Amino acid sequence: MTSLARRGVLKCLPVAAGAVLTGGAASPRAAARQEAGASFPQPETRRTPPHTERLETRLTVAFTEQALPGIGTVTTRTYEGTIPGPTLRVRPGDSLEITHVNALPPNDEAAQHDMNIPHHFNTFNLHTHGMHVDPTGEADNIYRTFEPSETPGGTTTYRSVVDVPADHPAGTFWYHPHHHGSTATQLLSGMGGLLVVEGDIDEVPEIAAAKDVVVCINELKLSGGRVPDLTSHGAYEGITSTFLVNGAKNPVLTIAPGEVQRWRIVNAGAITAHFLSLRGHELHQIACDGITLMEPVTTTGLTLPMGGRVDLLIRGGEPGTYKFSGGGPSQSLLTLVVTGEPRPMALPTALPGRPTSLPEPTRTRTLTFRSYENVFSGAFPNAYRILGDGETPPADPLAGRRDLAWGRLAADFVNQRIRLGEVEEWTVVNDSHAHSHHPFHLHTNHFLVTAVDNRRLATPVWHDTLSIPPNGSITFRLRAEDFAGRSMLHCHQLQHGDEGMMQVVDYVR
């Protein structure tokens, strides 16, 4: 029996169809008919030139006024004036060299400087999410700061050099800002773009024959045509999320009956996870978080957390119009129109995947994600903490402490030291109030998920980002490799992260 005969929703761990997962209470919106919008756009592509091993590019961040199909005119922080930013394509062994231009206005220096209270919304940096690259220096170093000019109208320039290892997996990754305190606001403005590593999976004949389609899902919190800064914990609670695909609301994508397309899907939002389904069609998954599966898995729906990626093969069914849903049963992310002459195309039965096993662990760790409501005075009353193993003792939330001893981020304090080459087993628990989902994200290395809620998976799955529902847990094995230095783990509900739900990781030899 081939893998395409398998049925399940194993990858990217689904929930009941139509569920909406956020960092706060789930609020199903009233059903409303959404008419099909703009024709299907694709972000600009910038790739390594032929016969070279270096992609040099510039990413300018500025407030940009743009007309978004289906939305109207908005002004938000953007990369290169578009939502999303350009798609960057490299190959293993390439060097990605980026000149960053900060054309944002000066920060409000009167703003709060407690590092675990959102601040400095015009400062950013670079995170190459999911990439197995150096977390230090000018590479994927999220402790850097790209400050704006102190002079209104001025600009500042910074540089990143990310060397892609020669054995880096081919897959779908992405880039986004990661300055602690401003990340949620910037992603909710549309900052982010795909980072594709080309390689062996692209050479599978059935995949090489398929149209390669970028599906970048952005989540905007628009109020009066702008995204307000996160100046209080509830700043976004009364604003309905606007979901865009490649900068358009509910764009229209066409496919012929029998045609196979490859969709590279990224949840580039900060607050909402998506249960993805395509009416009248099966989803044939070939990769999760940039790691190729050993064989395709066929399903009818899956959950994609904030920051997560999934590669799907879609084969056009009967002629008609179909809704690709996410963020709730009434939320159409895009409309698929099956039309034209049939184009019968095959699906692959085997893939050049990463083996799904690791040796027995030599160390175990348990981390607990816990949120406390209304324990502080001021505009940010909630406490978002990571407790458990490592240098993080248990917390008393009523003590009113904001320092590292009570589970919140302190950038100069290492919570987890991980020795390269050793296999560890981690259990990460969500011990928070109802409806508080915490997507766990580890920088620099993928982890192999072996159990969910203490139930073993028949086939373990590689992830770098995975949602943990309230009172739930995940268990995974980890073997950090190659790169020493300080990195990070955190909740990828990015408002929680900006408010302290992060830990410093130090990979050591």
Image (cartoon, grey):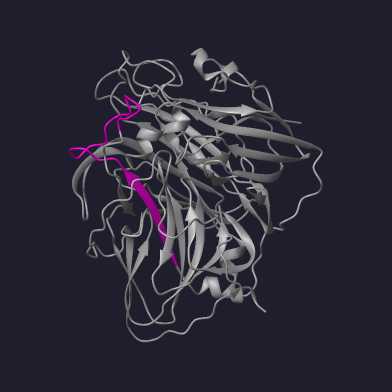
Look at the image and give the residue range highlighted in magenta. Answer: 212-235
Per the picture, the main secondary structure of the magenta-coloured stretch is loop
Check residue 73 for magenta coloring: no
Q: Quadrant of the N terminus?
A: bottom right
Residue 442, position in %: x, y?
59, 39
Q: Is residue 94 visible?
A: yes
Left-right relation of 68 to 326: left
Query: At x 60% / y 16%, what residue is drawn?
Result: 405
Check residue 233 for magenta coloring: yes
Q: Is residue 49 visible?
A: no
Query: At x 65% / y 77%, what residue is drawn?
Result: 2
Quarter location, residue 119: top left
Residue 358, position in %: x, y?
77, 50
Residue 297, position in %: x, y?
58, 68
Residue closest to the eye, 210 or 98 = 210
Residue closest to the eye, 503 or 380 = 380
Q: Quadrant of the C terminus?
A: top right
